[in-house]
């Protein structure tokens, strides 16, 4: 098999974004966050599971004083998630009057981020922004202003660097897209 291709479950994927490009884009985001949040001591909220690699690499490059917390989201379930956030799990920090930056692996439809932002805003933060590794602008179904985007991509299914396909692929250093 071609070394630039991998198989996960029943699908074949090819290399899409290499680790070096990911890190270069994350470094640029970290520099922008350092500038924008200088003197503000933000609280970074990493949304698990997908954002763990992005959060780790980003926060190693952020040099301003900051706090980090990890949250999970519970969604209403039918046969599959509707994207409606039922509750934020693990948020023990008081966000009132704080500058909060949500760290996401990918924003596609925007359902999850939209619901999360609504819940966070009800808690009275000074500000709330989103930083995401990947964004699919063509898929957005909510008017979201995502201020920090490492890279916009088309509506391709991707895995790696925290993103999974039915539980597998999160540990890959590069990002792969499905082969049509």
Image (cartoon, rainbow, N blue to C red):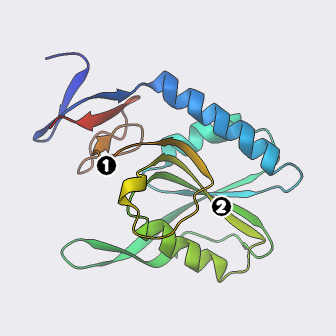
Q: Residue furthest bottom?
A: 122
Q: Residue furthest right?
A: 39
Label 2: state its secondary structure.
strand
Q: Quadrant of the C terminus?
A: top left
User: Considering only order in the chain, which callout, 1 or 2, is on the residue closer to the N terminus?
Assistant: 2
Q: Position of residue 82 (x, y in %)?
A: 31, 75
Image quadrant in which you'd find residue 130? bottom right
| Image mark for residue 90 | none
Q: Secondary structure at mark 1?
A: loop
Which quarter of the rendering shows the N terminus?
A: top left
Between 162 and 84, which is closer to the camera in this rendering? 84
Please provide percent x and percent y for residue 148.
Answer: 61, 49
Q: Is residue 73 above or below residue 139?
A: below
Q: Say how many tags the image has.
A: 2
Q: Are marks 2 and 1 in contact (CB under 8 Å)?
A: no
Left or right, 178 with reference to 108: left
Residue 102 % position (x, y) = 60, 59
Task: Tell me if 129 is positioned left or right of 144 in this view.
Answer: right
Image position, residue 93 (x, y; %): 69, 69
| Image depth: mark 2 or mark 1 in front | 1
Question: What residue is pinned by disc 2?
Answer: 129
In depth, the one of 3 and 177 nearer the eye is 177
Q: Residue at x 62, y 75 (%)?
A: 120
Q: CA distance from mark 2 to mark 1?
A: 23 Å
Going by the image, does 89 lie left or right of 6? right
Residue lying furthest left: 10
Local crowd size for mark 2, using a 10 Å CA cut-off: few (<14), some (14–19), many (≥20):
some
- Disc 1: which residue: 155
In percent of the image, x 69 and y 39: which residue is there?
30
170 up-or-down from 144: above or below: above
Q: Quadrant of residue 94?
A: bottom right
Sort mark 1 into few (<14), some (14-19) or many (20+) by Cα contacts within 10 Å: few
């Amino acid at each position: 098999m071609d070394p630039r291709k991998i198989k996960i479950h029943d699908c074949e994927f090819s290399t899409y974004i290499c680790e070096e490009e990911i890190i270069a884009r994350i470094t640029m985001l970290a520099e922008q966050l350092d500038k924008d949040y200088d003197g503000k001591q933000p609280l970074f909220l990493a949304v698990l599971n997908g954002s763990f690699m992005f959060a780790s690499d980003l926060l190693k490059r952020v040099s301003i004083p900051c706090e980090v917390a990890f949250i999970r989201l519970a969604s209403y379930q039918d046969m599959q998630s509707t994207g409606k956030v039922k509750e934020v799990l693990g948020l023990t920090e008081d966000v009132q009057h704080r500058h909060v930056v949500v760290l996401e692996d990918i924003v596609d439809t925007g359902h999850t981020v939209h619901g999360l932002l609504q819940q966070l805003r009800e808690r009275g933060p000074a500000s709330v922004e989103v930083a995401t590794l990947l964004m699919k602008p063509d898929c957005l179904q909510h008017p979201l202003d995502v201020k920090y985007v490492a890279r916009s991509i088309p509506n391709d299914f991707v895995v790696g660097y925290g993103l999974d396909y039915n539980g597998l692929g999160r540990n890959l250093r590069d990002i792969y897209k499905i082969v049509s």
